[in-house]
Image (cartoon, rainbow, N blue to C red):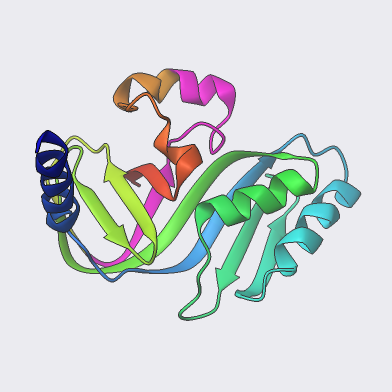
Amino acid sequence: MKSLKKIMIAAILLLSIPSAFAQLSRVDIVATGLTCSMCSNAINKQLKTLTDVEKVDIDLNTNTFVVFLKKNNQITPKILKDKVENAGFFVGEMVLYMTFEKQQTVTNSIISTNNMTFIFIDENTKILNGETKLKVYDKGYLTSKAFKKVAKLIKYDGNNAIEKGNVYHVKIV
């Protein structure tokens, strides 16, 4: 009987998570560990293997890869992070460009869309309407030094949800 109650509570919680349609259209990735143009070429090749990538622009001065995505893509931040790591490098920063329609956020509010869940760590209530830039603040999406500064803002459940699925802690930038 107790397990049935737990299942019912879990189902109610899952159904109460706001769902929104938001399309990921562009991702800016700052890679770390690059020493030459051949390094950036390795990342570029990995990113371009994804069928949902329309094009990749590279800024060699800042090691930034601007990834433009096709409409109705199934790309997640984790897929892009894995491609950078497959090339032998790390993500130092990731900014997502998404389009929302009148979606309200408050501190620790959760929005699920397109097989991704975003937990907003912003301190103010905001209405997301139109193209919105979201910076990912999870481990592996920032440099170690930057992550240590923001780790207190992120409340992990002990199971480290980011490694189990497409759950991302983000701030509006």
- Numbered-mark total: 0
**Is residue 62 or residue 150 the one in the foreground?**
150
Q: Quadrant of the N terminus?
A: top left
Does residue 133 appear left or right of residue 123 in this picture? right
Q: Residue 122 colored magenta? A: no
Q: Nearer the viewer, residue 10 or 32?
A: 10
Name above or below for residue 107 compared with residue 144.
Answer: below
* Location of residue 162 by image quarter: top left
Spot occupied by residue 171 in the image (x, y as percentages of width and height):
33, 42
Residue 111, image x, y percentages: 24, 55
Give how far across and how far down residue 9 sits, in percent.
11, 44
Q: Position of residue 36 (x, y in %)?
A: 88, 43
Magenta stretch in the rendered image: 129-148
Q: Is residue 148 visible in this depiction of the protein?
A: yes
Quadrant housing residue 22: bottom left
Q: Is residue 163 above or below residue 60?
A: above
What residue appears at the point 15 percent right and 39 percent down from the top-left corner? 6
**To which quarter of the image does residue 102 belong?**
bottom left
Give the left or right position of residue 139, taking residue 102 as reference: right
Residue depicted at 43% across the width and 31% down the height = 160
Residue at image position (68%, 69%) is 50
Can you see residue 61? no
